[in-house]
Image (tube, rainbow, N blue to C red):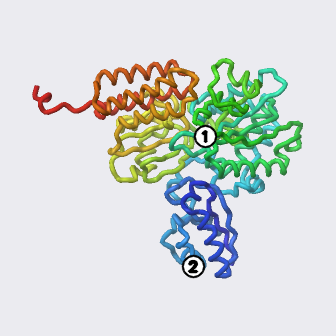
Amino acid sequence: MNMRIFVSRDAGAVAVGADEVALALEAAAATRGIKVEIVRTGSRGMYWLEPLVEVATPQGRIAFGPVTETDVPSLLDALASNTPHLLRVGATDEIPWLKRQTRVTFARCGVIDPRSLDDYRAHGGYKGFERALSLGPDAILAEVTASGLRGRGGAGFPTGIKWKTVAQTKADRKFIVCNADEGDSGTFADRMIMEGDPFLVIEGMTISGITVGATKGYIYIRSEYPHAVEAMNAAIKAARRGGYLGDKIGGSAYSFDMEVRVGAGAYVCGEETSLLESLEGRRGLVRAKPPLPAHHGLFGKPTVINNVLSFAAIPFILAEGAKAYADFGTGRSRGTMPIQLAGNIRHGGLFETAFGVTLGELVDDIGGGTFTGRPVRAVQVGGPLGAYFPRALFDTPFDYEAFAARDGLIGHGGIVVFDDSVDMRRQARFAMEFCAIESCGKCTPCRIGSTRGVETIEKIIRGERVAENLALVEDLCNTMKFGSLCALGGFTPYPVLSALKHFREDFVPAPTTLQAAE
C-alpha cells in the first residue's frame, strides 16, 4: 500500500505540532509496513484546523484536522481499512472556507512542496516569466499598469506608476527590493507566501527586474521569521540551479540575481526609506522625501520597493493577462486581497477574496464571530496603526477608498477582533506606547508626541481632568498626523482618534447619581 500524505511546514502549523505529526506518521507507517510519502507543504490558511493532514486519493485530497501525535495510529488504521475517522473534514477543495475564496496569489499555497522548483513549474509557475520574456519591458509595464495593481503593503500606491518611474530614470545600476518586514499585529500573509510558495515571490521580483532594468534584488525579511528566511534561501538556490536567477536567466539576454537580508527587529524598518538605511548597514532612520526611492534609493540608485504580496501578484498578471486580474475587485481596488483574520475570532486564518466584501461578512460570516462567544465590540483593520471600527461600520466594503472615507485604512489586510470585554482606553494607550517604543526618533512629533500621548491617556484612565486631557490627546494626534516624517507617527492617531470617536463612553466617566439628578 502506497500513500501520499501532505502536512504543512508553515510556522503556524509547526507551532501547534505539525513536525511531531509528520514524524509520528513516518514511524507509525513503518511499524505497519505501509509505504508513505510525506510532502511538507505550506498552510492552507485554516489555522483552527492545524495541524491539517491531507491524503491523496483518486478523487482528490481528503483533509483531517486538527491532528495530534496521538491521533496518528487511529488515522492510519482508518485510512488502511477505508473506514471513517472523527477528524475527517472531507474533500479539501469542498471545505466551505476554501471554496468561497478567490485564490489568485495563494493558489499554490498548501498544494505544492515549496522546496521543489519542479512542483512549482508543474502547477503553472514561471508562465508569467516566460510571457514577460516574450513581451519585453514596455509591454510588461503596460500589463502591470492596466491590471490596476496597487501596493499591498499598506500605502496602496499604483504599482505601474512606481515601476515606470524607475524604468525611466537613467542610471548605471538599479535595484529591486522586497519589503518582507511584516511587523503589523494580526498579519501573516507575507510569511505564509514565503514559506508556502517562495518561487512566486522570486518570479515576481525577476519580472520587475526585467521591466525596469535592474540586475540585483534584495528581500528584507524580519528576524522573527526564521522559517521564511530558510524557505526563501532554499528557493533562491534552487532557482539559481534551474537557471532562473543569475546570468542569462531562462536562456534570455537578461540577468537578475537576488539575496535575503535579515532585519534586526525594528518595526520602523517596514517604512521603505528606513528599510533602505538598514539594507545599507546603517541604523533604520526614516529619510526625508523627496528624493523618492524610485529616483534615489538603495545605494543612491533608482529602486523599486514593493511588498511581498505586490510581487506575488505579478506572475498571475503576466500569465493570465491584466484584464483577468482587473476583473476582480471594485472601483480603484482591483484584484484580490489576502485578508488575515486574527484576534478573538472563531475561524482565524487567511481568506483571499476580491475587493468589495464587507467587514461584517468577514468577521461574522467567514470568521464565525468571536472565539469566546461574546459579542464583537471592535475590529482593528490595518495593523497597530489601523482604526478601530464598531459594529455600526460593519457595512464598510473592503476597499481602499471605502475605508479612507470612514477614517480607516486597509493597510496590509490584517483584521484583529475584540469582544465586549475590551477596554478601549487601554487600546488607545497601547497605540501611543507602541509608537513611542518603535519610533526611530528622527522627528519630534512622533518621538515626543507619542510619549506625551501615553502620559495623557494614563491621566484620563485615572480620571484626572478628563475633558481637558481628551482635548490635549486630540491636539497631539493632529500634530502627529500632519507633522510626522513617516506613517508610523502619521498613522498612530488613527487607532487613538477612532477609539475616542466610536467608543467615547470608555473615556468619559459616567455621571454620578447626584449629577444625574441635577
Is 200 left, or right, of 443 in this rendering? right
Is 276 left, or right, of 73 in this rendering? right
Instruction: Name the kind of residue labelled 2 in the image.
Output: Asp
The residue carrying mark 2 is: 77
Camera-nearest residue between 450 and 373: 450
Q: Position of residue 477 (x, y in %)?
A: 43, 23
Is 420 left, or right, of 487 in this rendering? left
Residue at 57 percent across and 36 percent down: it is 267
The residue carrying mark 1 is: 265
Q: Position of residue 131 (x, y in %)?
A: 78, 40
Q: Counting residues from the N terminus, which is met first, the one under dot 1 or under dot 2? A: 2
Q: CA distance from mark 1 to mark 2?
A: 46 Å
Camera sees residue 270: yes
Q: Which quadrant is the C terminus positioned in?
A: top left
Instruction: Tell me if residue 126 comes above or below residue 441 in the rendering.
Output: below
Residue at 66 percent across and 18 percent down: it is 290
Instruction: Name the kind of residue labelled 1 in the image.
Output: Gly
- Secondary structure of residue under mark 2: helix
Q: Which quadrant is the N terminus positioned in?
A: bottom right
